Amino acid sequence: MKLIGAFLFVCTTSWIGFDMSTQLTKRTKQIRQMIQSLQLLEAEMSYSQMKLQQTFSILSKKTSYPIASFYDRLAYALTDAIPDFLSVWDQEVDYLQTISALKQNELDILKQFGRNLGQHTFIEQQKHIVLAIHHLQTELEEANEQRQKYEKVTKSLGVLIGLFIVLLLL
């Protein structure tokens, strides 16, 4: 019975280590997806010049989860007349935090970008999109460094901590 418990404990700590490693990989992937979606947003705004609701709907179809869900919820929220776009944007960014691996820095960049969306001329909005992409690129570089540095470590630590605790208890 002790062996089964020890095996399950090591499996659990290993799973935690692998999950932490997966979160590091997901973060870099999702930052990259957000950068691509902002580039698509810029292209849609410059060439099609549709309403934001239609643009968000198109973006939700061209991106993958969780970024697609973010844009889909924005498009749905804009189907009705809303008094304050910024509050809807902030609410959806907060929701994105719950379903994604994005950290607070990336979410702050998105919130800042949302404050300027729809408030300026097209050329100024392009500048804000480029600025947001630049900030996200910086976060992507940092996330890649963290992933390369800690991905193998978290996997190994999960297994080793589990083995260490089991050896202490036996």
Image (tube, rainbow, N blue to C red):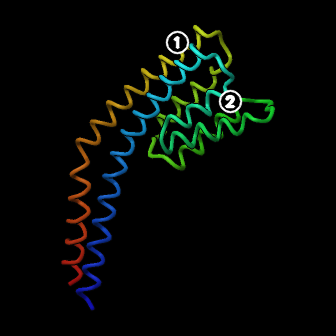
Question: Which residue is painted at 49% across and 22% down in the image?
Answer: 132
Residue beneath the point at 29% across and 40% down:
146
Residue 11's spot in the image, x, y percent? 28, 72
- Position of 56 relative to 7 (above/below): above
On screen, residue 76 above or below 83: below
Residue at horizontal 66%, vertical 12%? 120
* Quarter that holds the C terminus: bottom left
Expressed as whole percent of the image width and height from the top left, the position of residue 131 reads 48, 17
Residue 32 sits in which quadrant? top left
What is the number of the mark on residue 53?
A: 2
Q: Residues within 10 Å of mark 1 (few under 14, many from 20)?
A: few
Q: Are marks 1 and 2 in contact (CB under 8 Å)?
A: no
Q: Position of residue 112 (x, y in %)?
A: 57, 26
Q: Secondary structure at mark 1?
A: helix
Q: Which residue is mark 1?
A: 127
Q: Earlier in the sequence, mark 1 or mark 2?
A: 2
- Identity of the amino acid at label 2? Gln
Viewer-closest of 66 and 46: 46
| Rendered residue at 25%/79% (across/down) | 7
Quadrant of the snapshot with the N terminus? bottom left
Q: Position of residue 114 (x, y in %)?
A: 61, 27
